[in-house]
Image (cartoon, rainbow, N blue to C red):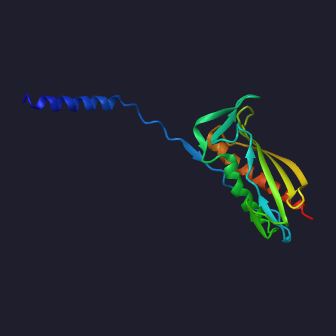
Amino acid sequence: MTARWPHALALLCLLLAGCAIPPAEPLRTNALLDQVPADVPHRTRSGRTLIVFPAEARAALDTQQMAYTRAPHELAYFARNQWAETPPQMLAPLLVRTMEATGAFTAVVAPPHATEAAIGVRTEILDLVQDFAPQPPVLRLALRVRVEDEATGRVLGTREIAVQEAMREATPAAGVQAANTAMAQALRELAAFVLAQLP
């Protein structure tokens, strides 16, 4: 019986230690920007190639952290909700898919690619924030787009596109849904702007 005491004591210690272990931290939710417009403007194929350069963003938005605000001039990030990739990384394939759907180009490519007949599109994310100050809260999205003739370096046009999409409730998940709706709208406007710059 004495020989069993060390084993019983060890088992009791393990059980007590198990009870003292705090519960596991909730898993972080990774969200996607993956919605493209259901309808995009079309035009006759131009015979040009479109180069979609990698999107950019200021440092506060060039992160997987999901931004929100409750007051002017303030920015914070959710602790348990984040983007699966940075917003510029998620925007790039959406731009390619949207511009391909216009049917206006012989090819829509990403760098490196060189051709004398190429048009270049450069995009910057200026704003992507869940704003809880207004009621109902809104998702703010703003893009700056620049269209260039890659052969001459001439800027054909620049534009800022700003969209506000109401959120159905004040939650990160509702913000993600609103962000996808806003992105689809912004991409539709962006495609129309790019097509308008073609000769």
The N terminus is located in which quarter? Answer: top left
Residue 6, above or below 121: above
Locate residue 183 relative to residue 17 in the image: left or right.
right
Q: Residue at x 84, y 61 (%)?
A: 119
Residue 130, above or below 72: below
State the image coordinates of residue 154 (x, y, percent, origin top left): 91, 56
Q: Residue at x 19, y 28 (%)?
A: 9
Instruction: Name the outermost residue toward the right.
Output: 199
Q: Residue at x 13, y 28 (%)?
A: 5
The C terminus is located in which quarter? Answer: bottom right
State the image coordinates of residue 94 (x, y, percent, origin top left): 71, 57
State the image coordinates of residue 180 (x, y, percent, origin top left): 69, 50
For residue 145, say whether it is visible.
yes
Instruction: Name the outermost residue toward the left.
Output: 1
Q: Residue at x 47, y 36 (%)?
A: 25
Res 41 quadrant in image: bottom right
Residue 48, above or below 140: below
State the image coordinates of residue 125 (x, y, percent, origin top left): 76, 45
Locate residue 21 relative to residue 50 in the image: left or right.
left
Q: Nearer the viewer, residue 11 or 92?
A: 92
For residue 37, say whether it is visible.
no
Locate residue 106 relative to residue 90 in the image: left or right.
right
How many labels were placed on the picture?
A: 0
